Amino acid sequence: MGERILEVENLTVDIPLAVGTLHPVQGISFHVDRGETLCIVGESGCGKSLASLAIMDLLPKRAVRRADRLVLDGKDILNLPESRMCDIRGNTMGMIFQEPMTSLNPVYTIGNQMIETLRRHRRVSVEDARDRAISLLEKVGISAAASRLGQYPHQLSGGLRQRVMIAMMLMCGPDLIIADEPTTALDVTIQAQILLLLAELQREFNMGLILITHDLGVVARIADRVAVMYAGQMVEQGSAASIFTHPAHPYTRGLLDCIPIPGKTRRGQPLGSIPGIVPSLIGTVTGCRFAARCPRVLDVCATDPPFRDGPAPGQAYRCHLDSTGSEPGAGATP
Amino acid sequence: MLVYSLKRLALALVVAVTVSIISFGLLYLSGDPAIAMGGESATAEDIQAIRVFYGFDRPLVVQYLDWVARALHGDLGKSYYFDASVFDLVFQRLPVTLTLGLSAILFAIALAVPLGIAAAVRPNSLIDRLALLISVMGQALPSFWFALMLIVLLSVTYPLLPPSGSETWAHFVMPTVVLGYYATPAIMRLTRAGMLEVLTSDYIRTARAKGLRPPVVLAKHALRNAVIPVVSLAAVQFGFMLGGSIVVESVFALHGAGFLAWESISRNDLPTVQGLILVFSLIYITLTFLSDLVNAWLDPRIRIG
Ligand SMILES: Nc1ncnc2c1ncn2[C@@H]1O[C@H](COP(=O)(O)OP(=O)(O)OP(=O)(O)O)[C@@H](O)[C@H]1O
Ligand SMILES: [Mg+2]
């Protein structure tokens, strides 16, 4: 793969609440290379959105962000003052949100909002910015692009608005796009279109793409690498192929059992589900966060599990079980 | 936008006609106008003569249409009290009231909107508390007391401003502050609440994700959405101030239309009261119409009405 676009090491987000401190992101590490799609998957509430907002430095005011390293394009962005961070957002790093219906400003035209993005970061004339907006709208599959520029968000459907958001974030030709469940709010028929569009644009613009999604079917189709989050932690990471063919973490296996795989799942065979609920993220917890729901839980799971290398190169997971599924020390027993 | 404006205009005209009927009817609400005009010593023949002379014996519809036709030509009848036409009386006094109302609402907006924004940007900060204090005081202080305190301070103790009259701009300073301060709390609270809500919205997060600088996010993306309800409120407040400036006009001896209304009511000078009500209502209707247009300009979603 190409050069490293983003490097995140030990990213933590804490939110002080009246009842205690919430730990929605507990020291996660990952990286994205140029031309690569990283999919982050995990149950609702496991901290995916807060992790991506933390990278953008757009966390809610009271949230506290910490990390060992946060590097974009080889530059440390962890300790940048807000004014320098403004120069980066929308320029080298863009973000697409879950709510297309409310993510565009209702009182300005599409054109106005797209053009201001480019002109904020580049010295270009309004005409040139307009031309770029038109060509990008065409690129994201919007017909009659020139006339759309004069329209307001309420005149467009949700799918079109999300396409506009994508085009807007591409105005400056960013190196990295973070798309946080960009299709959750859309019709099923449109979801696939938008995700494939993102994958296509990622290739064409040769960007890094972080795609947060619940949809493992989509992950299988467009991800180069997959990161699995559980209760604020990264529990498994690796190439898409390795995660799908030999998942190592019991949670990842559980997730994969929940979806039908064409050619593998027999018709009529019941799909799996993971019993139990996600543990509270408030207060300090030690041990494996998944232990309470794990079908293979051991006594040792009350202590923090180590990060282990998985069966494939580059695959890593956080568990006491080794990658063949045998228990620690099992090999030593005669 | 054009369709919307025409619709609003049509509505404004309907309201104007309704208001004209009401103010026309006012003359009859208080009893037979001929008796009122004739005074206590008038005989039955005198009253009948007055009735015929002023046309009170004709059908009401004819009288109304006649009255409207004259009003459109600027003839609002004659004052019972002054030897002058109501039109001249009202328009002689109106500039003072309009100047006072306009300067007061501008003062209120200039004070309330920035304070409201600052309070919303930093909730529970010192500036937020200051804004709350100003707002509470604005509601608790009676305007006559506030006016008198200002006169004591700025005209008596430190003779900086004239205490009464309406000759120069300096005469308008204290009345503007007193009247404008009265409208400040509501405008400020609405601005603050609107900003607080808008600042947590998804499109503000988008604006920040595009790298826009905080002042641009605030002034371009947040403010325009937050002030939409404030525009309507300011128009209503402005209307109130025109009618409600009686106390301020009397304290500072600004002989404006508010003061004229007060005098005319106490003198039973019905044509003048009627003319004032008509003119004030029309101003009020125009203000509402204008604020609707401003809102439609601010918010494209309103235009598809
Ligand atoms: N502003 C906030 N204040 C307090 N708690 C928050 C805030 N935002 C999120 N949380 C909590 O942090 C946890 C992680 O939230 P986050 O939005 O990152 O989850 P997610 O993985 O994106 O879930 P989803 O798939 O539903 O979008 C959740 O328990 C959530 O309730
Ligand atoms: Mg989320």
Image (tube, coloured by chain):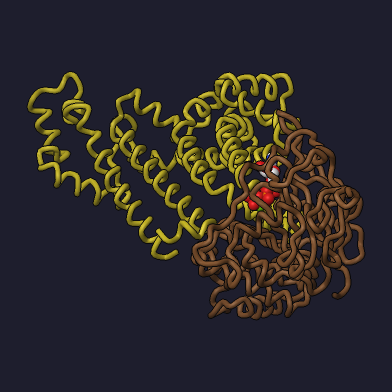
Coordinates of residue B265 in the picture (x, y in percent) = 34, 26
In which of the image's four quarters is ligand 1 placed? top right
Give x and y (percent) for residue A3.
Answer: 88, 72
- The structure residue drawn at horizontal position 63% and vertical position 67%, both measured from the top left corner, is A218
Q: Is residue A32 left or right of residue B188?
A: right
Which chain is displayed in brown in the rendered image? A
Q: Quick check: A300 left or right of B263? A: right
**Residue B258 at x, y = what percent?**
44, 32
The answer to whether residue B229 is left or right of residue B197 is: left
Q: Residue at x 71, y 71 (%)?
A: A170
Residue placed furthest toward the left: B45
Chain B in the picture: what colour? Answer: yellow
Closest to the observer: B97 or A209?
A209
* In the image, residue B55 above or below residue B205: above
Residue A140 appearing in the image: yes
Seen from the viewer's position, the closer of residues B106 and A88 is A88
Asked whether A241 or A137 is in front, the reply is A241
Q: Position of residue B36 (x, y in %)?
A: 20, 26
Q: Is residue B77 above or below residue B296?
A: above
Image quadrant of residue B187? top right
Residue located at (57% from left, 78% from top): A145
Q: Quadrant of residue A256?
A: bottom right
Looking at the image, can residue A56 be seen?
no
Q: Quadrant of the N terminus of chain B?
A: bottom left
Q: Quadrant of the C terminus of chain B?
A: bottom left
B51 up-or-down from A74: above or below: above
Which residue is depicted at the point 68% across and 70% down? A115
Q: Nearer the viewer, residue B82 or A49?
A: A49
